[in-house]
Amino acid sequence: MTAENSPSALLAARDLTFLRQDEPVFGPLDFALRAGEVVLVEGDNGSGKTTLMRVVVGLLHADEGTLYLDGAPLDRDLARGRLLFLAHHLGLKADLSPLENLRIAIGLYGCREAITPQQALHTVGLQGYEHEPVRQLSAGQKKRSALARLLLVPADIWLLDEPFANLDREGIALVNRLIERHVAEGGAAMVTSHGAVTFLHGEPRRLRLSA
Ligand SMILES: Nc1ncnc2c1ncn2[C@@H]1O[C@H](COP(=O)(O)OP(=O)(O)OP(=O)(O)O)[C@@H](O)[C@H]1O
């Protein structure tokens, strides 16, 4: 048994490789993400950070290697409801309001108990904008609208691609608070960022991709 497929890892990879036109975008890559842990995925522009996240959530297929969930080869049916992806492209329907977008997310992925979409939007600072069409929101407000999904949708493994992009100082602090609370409750997060990650409880582990 290796660190990658040890039962203590929620998510892990061994020899994970993704190719474009027979050239590796990343890999072979080994990593493990344990409960209560943040892994910061680092690398220059084009080094494959977003591609890695898309492979982990199943939007792209790895050419080689294995992903593990709870120590067993990842089964996409079992992974549904465990992985939550906040993509750089936020996946919001522009003609719908933040509230309507959240209701769609809840319909697809379920909702945590003891929180409503309105409360989630309040927490991310969108009170007063609940019913505005998303296309009329600023870039930071759109990002906040997407962040509200993190509060509502039950998933223990967060994959956050540039979660700080377009946010003001208070928004950056909000993301750091959300991540800290998530890992304190036994969740885990993989985060790509070109900066802005500050944690109260120690340094995140780092996974470096090279272009
Ligand atoms: N749809 C696509 N078709 C072809 N090549 C792509 C596509 N998307 C990304 N690539 C290429 O794959 C490589 C990795 O891209 P990726 O977006 O994963 O990098 P990244 O590390 O997230 O970059 P950034 O820091 O700029 O966000 C780059 O060389 C990019 O040009």
Image (cartoon, grey):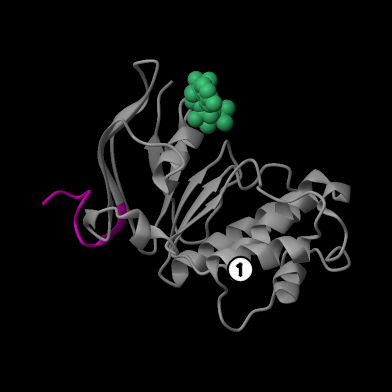
Asked if residue 83 can be seen in this view, the reply is yes
Residue name at image x 15 percent, y 48 percent = 2
Number of disc labels? 1
Assess whether residue 198 is covered by the magenta stretch: no
Q: Quadrant of the C terminus?
A: top left
Q: Residue at x 42, y 62 (%)?
A: 82
**93 or 1, which is in the foreground?**
93
In the displayed structure image, the side of residue 122 where residue 163 appears, left or right: left
The residue sitting at 77% across, 48% down in the picture is 140
Q: Position of residue 13 (x, y in %)?
A: 28, 44
Residue 45 seen in render: no
Nearest the viewer among 66 and 78 is 78
Q: Would residue 208 appear left or right of 6 to someone viewing this image?
A: right
Report the magenta residues as a range: 1-11
Does the magenta-highlighted stretch encompass residue 8? yes
Q: Nearer the viewer, residue 131 or 140?
A: 131
The residue tagged 1 is 107
**Which secondary structure is most common in the magenta stretch?**
loop
Which residue type carries mark 1? Answer: Gly
